[in-house]
Image: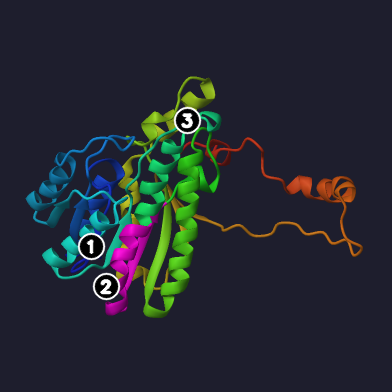
Amino acid sequence: MSGCLEGKVVAITGAGRGIGHELALHCAAQGAAVVVNDPGVAQAGDGGDTAPAEATANAIIAAGGKAVANFGNVADPKEAAGIVEDAVARFGRIDAVVNNAGILRDTIWHKMSYEDWKSVIDVNLTGVFNVSKAATPHFREQQSGSFIHFTSTSGLIGNIGQANYSAAKLGVVALSQSIALDMARVGVRSNCIAPFAWSRMTSSIPAETPEQQERVRRMQEMSADKIAPLVAYLASDLSRDVTNQIFSVRKNEILLFSKPRPVRSMVRLDGWTAETIADELIPAFRPAFARADEVSAHVFPYDPV
């Protein structure tokens, strides 16, 4: 029985370990030829190792699938382009790009350095641009293609100590939206996934207070393989009419996120002053205010299903 990705070629960044590893195995099992990209860096982006990408690619080949390892750094435009070039050179085409690669340099805002900021933006946001840009000419020529970008509730909702990562991940949503709008005319779609899964990236979540420990316990219940079916669906022709959306996967639960929309409006025909804003507008708006200290644990206080 053929899978939903039979004959497709899928490039997955950060596919040597964690979520990306599971995505690669599942897409291959669904019939895709997979470019397994991973430079094998540490969580903060340091170093490099060919072993993770090679191990994932070899596991796919051993199971009877098609794969090639790529060690490019998505933050480098030339190396990012090499991911797409490997797909075309080895398998003749590119049908889907899964922008999963990411690094973390978590630190509280007042201690965050420029290097902490730039390195995370370079990989988590500019890297998405680089790989997507490289695939775009191929998608335009064949009048088809799927971009699947990994965002995070750190950007959609917020998180402590992750100003760099949160900014990058919300930027990914805006980038995906623009790609979806610009590329719709040539049959190309672009969607985001915010994953909940215990991996190397989430293992840095602090677990000092009872509330933090409970959050980590929930995260550990959510395995990376649960995200893979949604990626396979979005990469396949089954999703040909699905674009410009933000999904999330939380164990066996799949969610659809809304985009920012106005929630309240108030008009004063003679205009506003600071005093009338304080006296009239803010009391009217306050019931709809977002919680000032909100993180994803407040939005998802229940155990994963």
Residue 274 lies left or right of residue 251; in this view the side is right
Quarter-of-image position of residue 192: bottom left
Side of 262 relative to 118 (left or right): right
Residue 15: which disc? none
- Whichever of callouts 1 and 2 sits on the residue coming sooner in the sequence is 1
Within 10 angstroms of label 1, few (less than 14), some, or many (20 or more) residues? many
Q: Crowding at label 2, few (<14), some or many (≥20) Cα neighbours within 10 Å?
A: some
Look at the image and give the residue range highlighted in magenta: 129-150
Label 3, on which residue? 107
Residue 251, quarter of picture: top left
Q: Earlier in the sequence, mark 3 or mark 1?
A: 1
Q: Is residue 143 magenta?
A: yes
Type of the residue with mark 3: Thr
Q: Amino acid at mark 1?
A: Val
The percent position of residue 84, horizontal first and vertical second, equals 23, 62
Neighbor class of circle 3 (other Cα within 10 Å; few <14, some 14-19, many 20+) is: some
Structural distance between the alpha carbons of marks 3 and 2: 39 Å
Circle on res. 84: 1
- Pointers 1 and 2 in contact (C-beta within 8 Å): yes
Q: Nearer the viewer, residue 198 or 304?
A: 198
The reply to whether residue 305 is in sight is no
Q: Position of residue 279 (x, y in %)?
A: 89, 46
Quadrant where the N terminus sits is bottom left
All told, the count of numbered labels is 3
Q: Residue 81 appears at what percent x and percent y?
A: 25, 60
Q: Is residue 173 above or below residue 303?
A: below
Residue nearest the viewer, comparing 123 with 160: 123
- Residue beneath disc 2: 138
Mark 1–mark 2 distance (CA, rounded to whole Å) = 9 Å
Q: Main secondary structure of the magenta part?
A: helix
- At horizontal 50% and vertical 26% (from top left) the residue drawn is 212
Answer with mark 3 or mark 2, whichever residue precedes in sequence: 3
